[in-house]
Amino acid sequence: MEIYDVIVVGAGPAGMSAALYTSRANLKTLVIEKECPGGKMIKAKKIDNYIGSESDPFKLASNMFSQVSKAGAKYVTGNVISIKLENKIKKVILSDGKEYNGKSVIFAIGGKVGQNNFKYDYYLNKGLSYCAICDGSFYKGKTVAVIGDNDAVENSVDYLANIADNIYFINIEDKESTRENVENFTKVTDYEIGGKDVVKYIKIGEKILDVDGVFYEVDSNNFSGFINEITTENGYIKVDENMQTNIEGIFACGDIVYKSVKQVVVAASQGAIAAINAIKYVNQNK
Ligand SMILES: Cc1cc2nc3c(=O)[nH]c(=O)nc-3n(C[C@H](O)[C@H](O)[C@H](O)COP(=O)(O)OP(=O)(O)OC[C@H]3O[C@@H](n4cnc5c(N)ncnc54)[C@H](O)[C@@H]3O)c2cc1C
């Protein structure tokens, strides 16, 4: 039976960073990705805030992938559907029936935001954004709407209030922003986004608000399946400071881990932490 030291599930920035570290430590590493290397960052028009790289996201993804491949990680395309624990071995099962065995597993499968779960996803990069921290600076002096929940006040509305001139905050819950340039709409259940090719307005009841952009910041992550034994919190995988889950030898990093800051730089750094601790785990269990 072939056994990998580390199986990384997902080849976004978190998974590729993790695989780089484990491969460079000479651990037998397998990366399993269901789509293509790069993860959610390749949905971005531009990534300007990854330090050292003002880059086309495809170029960034392709550089990451070639670095990981050169370091020796094996890459396969496949959709992981479950993980079975067999003593210390983790059996990773794909939807096509293939199975891979690992001494450790790193979950780097990303979160749900931006994965076609929003009705108006077709406006993505045409005035719709899922991330104020990523795209806020493109709206300097403009008018934007934020559709969000209570967490969006801190995570995006107040952040954007320093950049945009006017903000309409459409909250599906009840918290308001106290910033002067924010108009609050609370407990909104129904709205419509419109515009011919790009976002032009948002309609609430009979009220039409002209906007240059809309930020959708409703958190709807719901990690389930794969492995029953894993502990989650608010739909995210719960980890300790070593990025280890409640199961020894299973780590998680990036957007699938509970946190408010979903960024490439955070995913990559968490991938490194998960990898370094996976290396220690594999070495201790030799
Ligand atoms: C439109 C958009 C613009 C953004 N702009 C920026 C920006 O400018 N700057 C910035 O820092 N961040 C930006 N982000 C956020 C950034 O892309 C994410 O924070 C980052 O990609 C998270 O990395 P990750 O590796 O945790 O997850 P992801 O990038 O989501 O990668 C997870 C990977 O796992 C794979 N996967 C999932 N499930 C399985 C499975 N069952 N089996 C196998 N593979 C699986 C997925 O196909 C995916 O490739 C943006 C996000 C979006 C959507």
Image: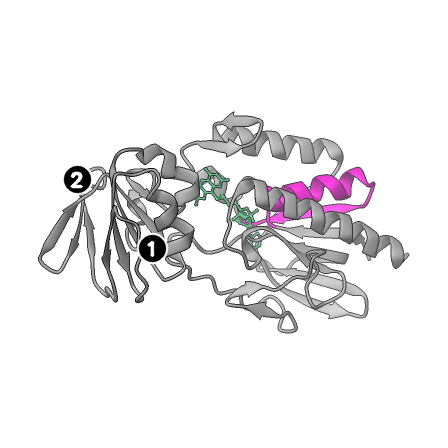
In the image, residue 42 above or below residue 109:
above
Q: Badge 1: few (under 14), some or many (20 or more) residues near its Cα, within 10 Å?
A: some
Picture quarter containing residue 137?
A: top left
Q: Secondary structure at mark 2?
A: loop
Ligand 1 lies under 8 Å from the Cβ of mark 1: no
Residue appearing at x 50%, y 48% in the figure: 262
- Amino acid type shown at disc 1: Phe
Coloration of the structure image: one colour
Q: Indicate the quadrant containing the C terminus: top left, top right, bottom left or bottom right.
A: bottom right
In the image, residue 265 above or below residue 260:
above
Q: Is residue 282 left or right of residue 144?
A: right
In the image, residue 285 above or below residue 26:
below
Which residue is under mark 1? 118
- x and y percent of residue 10 in the render? 60, 49
Residue appearing at x 8%, y 58% in the figure: 206
Residue appearing at x 70%, y 51% in the figure: 274
Picture quarter containing residue 249?
A: bottom right
Which stretch did the figure color magenta?
A: 10-34
- x and y percent of residue 32 in the render? 63, 49
The residue closer to the viewer here, 188 or 64, is 188
- x and y percent of residue 106 in the render? 68, 54
Residue 111 in sight here: yes
Q: Is residue 61 left or right of residue 278?
A: left
- Amino acid type shown at disc 2: Lys
Q: Going from the N terminus, do you reach mark 2 or mark 1 first?
A: 1
Q: Is residue 152 magenta?
A: no
Residue appearing at x 52%, y 44% in the figure: 263
- x and y percent of residue 91 in the render? 72, 63
Q: CA distance from mark 2 to mark 1?
A: 18 Å
Which residue is under mark 2? 196
Q: Which residue is farthest bottom?
A: 229
Q: Badge 2: few (under 14), some or many (20 or more) residues near its Cα, within 10 Å?
A: few
